[in-house]
Image (cartoon, rainbow, N blue to C red):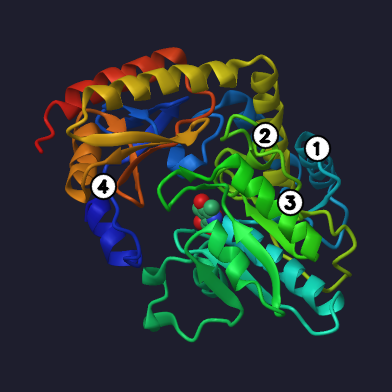
Amino acid sequence: MNLEEIDKEFVLHSYGRGYVNFIKGENATLFSEDGTDYIDFASGVGVCSVGHGNKRLADAICEQAKNLLHVSNLWVIEPQALLAKRVVELSGYDMRLFFANSGAEANEGALKIARKYGQLNFDKKRYKVITLENSFHGRTITTVKATGQEKMHTPNFSPYPDGFKHVESIDDIYLNIDDETVAVMIELVQGEGGVEPFKKDEIQNLAKILKSKGLLLIVDEVQTGVYRSGEFLASNYYEIEPDIITLAKGLGGGLPIGAVMTNLKDIFEPGDHGSTFGGNYLVTRGAGVVLDILEQEYKDRAIAKRVELFNENLERLAASLPELFSSTVGLGLMRGLRANSSEIQAQVIKEAFDNRVILLKAGRNTVRFLPPLTISEDEIVEGFKRLEVALSKVGV
Ligand SMILES: *Cc1c(COP(=O)(O)O)cnc(C)c1O
């Protein structure tokens, strides 16, 4: 059996996956088995924030693996405590953290925090969380239900937990707050929903109104967090102070780690929440190095320069192809091209791949770009050069 046959025989078919076998990576360049090089504008869906084959990250992981991988959360874990301190300090918020293994698990933690807050702080229990129709919050039964996209709520997995209300827009949030509402959960830039940023004043107003009512603002920064927006958190860019923030994708640079942080610093007591693997030595040591690298690049304005160069190239490409794209969208190094149809979107991604550029799709016919935050100037320029050639082959 070849690799494709083995995969299809033994792995459940929950992904529509491609069968190129990548065997090596260097920053934003991936190499397949036959030696073909690809410019990676996807970074494993925003995960490989410090690129592929990052030596500092790899060395730290190796060194840690030779000493300790895991002792369980029954003991204090030095790199976990230090990482929590780092994340809180970089965020600028007065918060505490819990480490999970994924975005969905971080969001589950956020929902538990909100529910406990709703149980303890009101005469009549509050437990409903309002989310948006184009949102994406994960794949567990609860986070699938938190996700507003109706197509995700298939009867195949029902019944779903109670307590979610999906609304179309931020204005509709206000109309749907009732005496059981405890929180609003929102992505500041909707990732899967089409790399769609909200307006700053709209978000600031939402934060203000929720605060005045004693309701919680949960910001899902699983995709936008850890410098993806150009700032450490998109919440920093929007200049708001959420009550709960979740992180995952870029935090570990490829290590499976998620986190939920909150200003409700005493919400949990021992026994309220837990995770066997969450925050173990390996992932928190690695994530600490990811933050060391990215904080330095942020301070040196290297990330800002990449954002600028990427933006110039994206704008030029979009402007030169009005028959394919209506606009550019996104923030920082989380960007998109709005295709004029879903057929164009699919063709663009396919032609790009055939010309050795990896892109992603997202909702609203969006072609999505999530390059490593460390992508080099040469890789950006080369990627767009290849794209230009690829897109000349897309027919309308
Ligand atoms: C990817 C993503 C999730 C889910 O993260 P997993 O690690 O796949 O569980 C949740 N929210 C947002 C905004 C995401 O982009």
The spot of residue 44 in percent (x, y) is 44, 42
Q: CA distance from mark 1 to mark 3?
A: 11 Å
Where disc 4 sits, the SS reads loop
**Cβ atoms under marks 1 and 4 closer than 8 Å:** no
The spot of residue 110 in percent (x, y) is 70, 63
Q: Quadrant of the C terminus?
A: top left
Where disc 3 sits, the SS reads loop
Residue behind mark 1:
92
**Cβ atoms under marks 1 and 3 closer than 8 Å:** no
Residue type (three-letter) at the residue carrying disc 1? Gly
Name which of mark 2 and mark 3 comes first in the sequence.
Answer: 2
Where disc 2 sits, the SS reads loop
Q: Residues within 10 Å of mark 4 (few under 14, many from 20)?
A: few
The spot of residue 35 in percent (x, y) is 27, 26
**Cβ atoms under marks 4 and 3 closer than 8 Å:** no
**Cβ atoms under marks 1 and 2 closer than 8 Å:** yes
Residue behind mark 2:
232
Name which of mark 4 and mark 3 comes first in the sequence.
Answer: 4
Name which of mark 1 and mark 2 comes first in the sequence.
Answer: 1
Q: On residue 19, which mark appears?
A: 4
Residue type (three-letter) at the residue carrying disc 4? Tyr
